[in-house]
Image (tube, coloured by chain):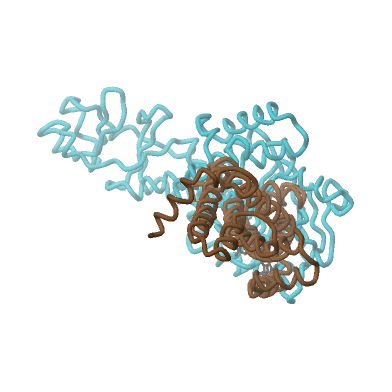
Amino acid sequence: MNVLGFVSDFFGDSAHWHGYDGIPHRLLEHVQYSLLALALAAAIGLPVGLVTGHTGRGGNALALLATAARALPSFGLLVLMAVLLGIGLVPVMIPLVVLAVPPILVTTYEAVRSVDPSPVDAARGMGMRETRILFQVEMPVALPLILSGLRSAAVQIVSTATIAAYVSLGGLGRYIVDGLYQRDYEKVVGGATLVAVLALVTLAVFWAVGRLVVSPGVRRH
Amino acid sequence: MIRIEEVTKRYPDGTVAVDRLCLEIPDRAITVLVGPSGCGKTTTLRMINRMVEPSEGAIYLDGADIRRRPVTALRRSMGYVIQNAGLFQHRTILDNIATVPRMLGWGKRRARERAAELMERVGLDASLAGRYPYQLSGGQQQRVGVARALAADPPVLLMDEPFSAVDPVVRKGLQDELLRIQDELGKTIVFVTHDIDEAIKLGTRVAVLRTGGRLAQFAPPAELLSDPADSFVEDFLGADRGIRRLSFFPSDGLELTTDPVVRAGATAERTGGFGAPYLLVTDAQGRPLGWSRPQDLAAGGADPGRLLPYGRPFVPGTDSLRAALDCAVLSPTGWAVAVDSGGRVTGVVSQQTIGEAIRGAHAGERAAGEVAR
Ligand SMILES: Nc1ncnc2c1ncn2[C@@H]1O[C@H](COP(=O)(O)OP(=O)(O)OP(=O)(O)O)[C@@H](O)[C@H]1O
Ligand SMILES: [Mg+2]
């Protein structure tokens, strides 16, 4: 039995398409966890990155914090959180958010920092207020980089959200964890394939969003 | 009027960029700040819109200390143009220009109408309105920068080396355009440059700053050229100060002669007997074709291929003595060709005659100066 066989058997089995443990439901759970984690990480990373990038202050402290956060193993953090907080959504969200904040924060900071200073100078000279400068001059130009930070965070979340299954939650990780436990390799491979496909879909979504929100005057780069 | 009073700027690292500067910037005129790199031109300009705060002294706008107004209101009353234009690359040309009107709360339609008006005023084709800055040449971008600064019709325009990043031909076009716009709009313009030629061309008054941020001289350009305050100003003006000064003398007093001017196909008697070493041949409409020796003309008529080039003609009254002298120096015969606005020859003038006119003009000015004193 090769991997392709596993894949076709897994997806060919109509039992896998229905019910609580069916692909649609697990996929939905997985997407929900991922979106929630991404939203939380963006809610922290974007504002902090924008403000520090605009003022140019606190960049070193940020880089230090981000490196430290990257060094934390997600799985270890999950186990620790589960022990401390019990089973539930919160101990799953914490490692995912810790994973996703650094790429969002650091790229947003860098994106705003690297905006050409002369339009900013011109805007200030014509009497534009600082918030307006940030949102109407710097952010539109920094947008492609900011989106790339969000994108890599999103892809990491999607693949790491499988760990939710270790603390009895759902998502595509269920197939992998259960499959390993039951030595049902068809299930393991099927679950892994779904995660990979979801990551690719995430990339496609970000590409489409970029086409929509980035100005053609900026996009040519 | 903008009055800079005893202003000193000391940056936190101890650099004194501007040192006890006093300057009275007249309304509705172009005041140029010029000087070597690092002499505090940009710092001075940016203190006027409070992008930099003076360490000592004060700046007054129409008699009121500029610190008494909210800083955004002050800046919105002053257009600001910088070296690389600083356009917003995510906005179209039209929306770039509409920025300040939009900021002041104008409706989108009205702001865009105003922007379209300004595009025309600064010489930008309407077809560029929907483009993004990266689709424009450097010179066009700079025009957009000027249009954007003028959009809300501010009484004051601050310009920091706006034309220094474009090539000389484009720069000349932009300078001419600025002078034309200024003729129409009459703004109070403070213009920073390190190019003394640009300063002399554009300035109603020119402030020469020396390194260390001190004022060396503040005078109209002609006076700067005729009476530099000290050796620093003299050096800064360059070696050809005397020639440059000629730009300020008109050429309409030059005595022209039409004796050596002949039409192509003129008869032999007409072409000889003036004693002139060269004759200027014109076409039937009187436009210059080139110089020829009388004996060549008599022999074979005006073969255009064998004529000597006549160089660039000057227009008496419009061009200065400098242009006339330039024509004569560049002409292979040593004679300058004068034409009317239609390009028809009105006469020719020798280097010698121009030299006499120059001496006359200088003498006249000295006499006028003594009367004034
Ligand atoms: N933010 C700053 N901090 C410290 N020193 C500064 C700062 N800005 C300018 N300076 C210094 O002040 C002096 C004047 O600078 P300024 O930019 O006004 O010169 P400039 O005449 O505009 O020169 P350039 O022709 O090169 O643009 C220079 O010695 C410069 O190094
Ligand atoms: Mg400067």
**Residue B283 horizontal side relative to residue B120, left or right:** left
Q: Residue at x 67, y 51 (%)?
A: A35
Is A220 rendered above or below residue B110?
A: below
Residue B287 image offset from top left, x and y in percent = 31, 29
Residue A197 image offset from top left, x and y in percent = 50, 51
Figure quarter occupied by ligand 1: bottom right
Residue B131 image offset from top left, x and y in percent = 52, 37
Tint of chain B: cyan
Tint of chain A: brown
**Residue B250 horizontal side relative to residue A38, left or right:** left
Is B148 rendered above or below residue B246?
A: above
Is B265 rendered above or below residue A152?
A: above
* Residue B227 can be seen, yes or no: no
Residue A84 image offset from top left, x and y in percent = 80, 71
Q: Nearer the viewer, residue A138 or B68?
A: A138
Name the outermost residue toward the top.
B284
